[in-house]
Image (spheres, rainbow, N blue to C red):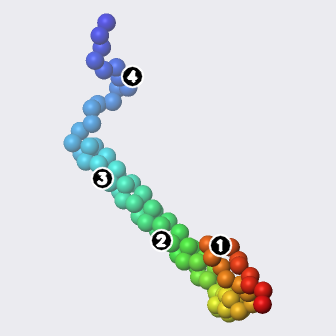
Amino acid sequence: MYQKFITHSNSKPSGLLARIFKTIVALILISLVVILATVLFVYLAIAALLIFGYWRWKTRNLRKNMPEQTRQKDTTQEGEIIEGEVIRRSE
C-alpha cells in the first residue's frame, strides 16, 4: 500500500558528476538572469533620463517666463489680499 517513491523510468540515480553539472548549469542560468535584469535596468534608466531631458528642453521657455508673469500679475492687481479675500479700497 505505502510506496515511498514511484519512478516510471529505468534511469539510474544521479551520480556526483551529474549533480555537479546540474549545479553549474543552474548557476549559469541564474547569472544570465541577473545580467539580463541589470542590462534592462540600465536601458530603462537611460530612457528615463532621455525623456526627462527632452521634457526639460521643451519647457525651458515656460520656466524662463514664469518669474516675469508673476511680476506682471503682482503689479496689475489692486487691493489687499487677506486670507484669500481681496479687499479693494476705493479712493
Q: Quadrant of residue 80?
A: bottom right
**Residue, disc 1:** 84
Question: In the image as oriented, which residue stretches furthest toward the left?
Answer: 16
Q: Nearer the viewer, residue 86 or 63?
A: 86
**Residue, disc 2:** 42
Position of residue 28 relative to residue 69, above or below, is above
- Other-residue count near label 2 (Cα within 10 Å), few / some / many at <14 / 14–19 / ≥20: few
Q: Quarter of the image containing the C terminus?
A: bottom right
- Other-residue count near label 3 (Cα within 10 Å), few / some / many at <14 / 14–19 / ≥20: few
How far apart, in angstroms, are the residues tagged by discs 3 and 2?
27 Å
Locate residue 78, reporting x and y percent.
73, 87
Residue drawn at the location 25% of the way across and 48% of the way down: 20
Residue drawn at the location 31% of the way across and 46% of the way down: 22
Looking at the rendered structure, the kind of residue marked 1 is: Gly
How far apart, in angstroms, are the residues tagged by discs 2 and 4?
47 Å
How far apart, in angstroms, are the residues tagged by discs 2 and 1?
48 Å
The numbered dot on residue 8 is 4
Q: Are marks 2 and 4 in contact (CB under 8 Å)?
A: no
Locate residue 68, reporting x and y percent.
68, 93
Looking at the rendered structure, the kind of residue marked 2 is: Val
Looking at the rendered structure, the kind of residue marked 3 is: Ile
Q: Nearer the viewer, residue 9 or 62?
A: 62
